[in-house]
Amino acid sequence: QVQLKESGPGLVQPSQTLSLTCTVSGFSLTSNSVSWVRQPPGKGLEWMGAIWSGGSTDYNSALKSRLSISRDTSKSQVFLKMNSLQTEDTAIYFCTRGDLRGYYYVMDAWGQGASVTVSS
Amino acid sequence: DIQMTQSPSSMSASLGDTVTINCLASQDIGNYLSWYQQKPGKSPKLMIYGATNLEDGVPSRFSGSRSGSDYSLTINSLGYDDEGIYHCHQYYEYPLTFGSGTKLEIK
């Protein structure tokens, strides 16, 4: 069965770098994409970026200068690194599987989310 | 960026009611719209894709529709299990964007 699980530090200091790992099972990273989506407390969802099955990446332009997404297919892991963190980056960070339903791209499986607080 | 204006931000309805949640896209997105349901403390769950297609396993009480740039999610015969936050999502153009969410409470 398809599963995704985020891991990483719960607390990051301002101006530091956030590193999160998404470990997947039940599918191959060379067959499906993985996106990162975050949700600040009490707010809506924000798509951060994706790594596609071929290894290319796309980023939200609002975060592009600070964000990097990479993967290790042998370990079925996707990595998120974001630098220069500020308090407004406090959020739940989700990794999601992308798949196709005919012409339509969907995020059909989500991890449980990793809570990240930016605070000194 | 494509803005998704979602309404209402919150609503309360009774068991058995029919409710409709709306999303207005700031530009044409074709049928490249999904709806997600999110329960408290949980991750979102895909309900509708392609504006009108029901994801496998989702009850047929849920339906999606489109009129121009207006997209709607309708839930018939509301049950307690339908309580949560509903998000619309466009995947027509990068960056992918979401509506601000609609919190549905069952009275």
Image (cartoon, coloured by chain):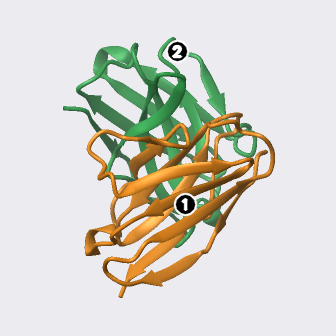
Chain colours: A green, B orange
Say above or below: B68 vs A96: below
- Helix, strand or loop under label 1: loop
Asked if marks 2 and 1 touch (Cβ < 8 Å), the reply is: no
Q: Which mark is residue A66?
A: none
Say above or below: A116 vs A108: below
* The C terminus of chain A sits in image quarter: bottom right
Identify the residue at horizontal 65%, vertical 58% (top origin): B23
- Packing grade of label 1 (10 A; few <14, some 14-19, many >=20) is some
* The N terminus of chain A sits in image quarter: top left
Q: Dot 1 corresponds to which residue?
A: A13
Identify the residue at horizontal 39%, vertical 15% (top origin): A31
Kindly indicate the quadrant of the structure image that contains residue B72. bottom right
Q: Dot 2 corresponds to which residue?
A: A55
Residue A17 pos. (x, y %): 57, 46
Residue A24 placement, left or right of B53: left
Q: Nearer the viewer, residue A88 or B102?
A: B102
Chain ID of residue with mark 1: A
Residue B24 placement, left or right of B10: right
Identify the residue at horizontal 60%, vertical 32% (top origin): A68
Under mark 2, the amino acid is Gly
Q: Same subunit under labels 2 and 1? A: yes
Residue A67 pos. (x, y %): 63, 38
Residue A82 pos. (x, y %): 59, 43
Chain ID of residue with mark 2: A
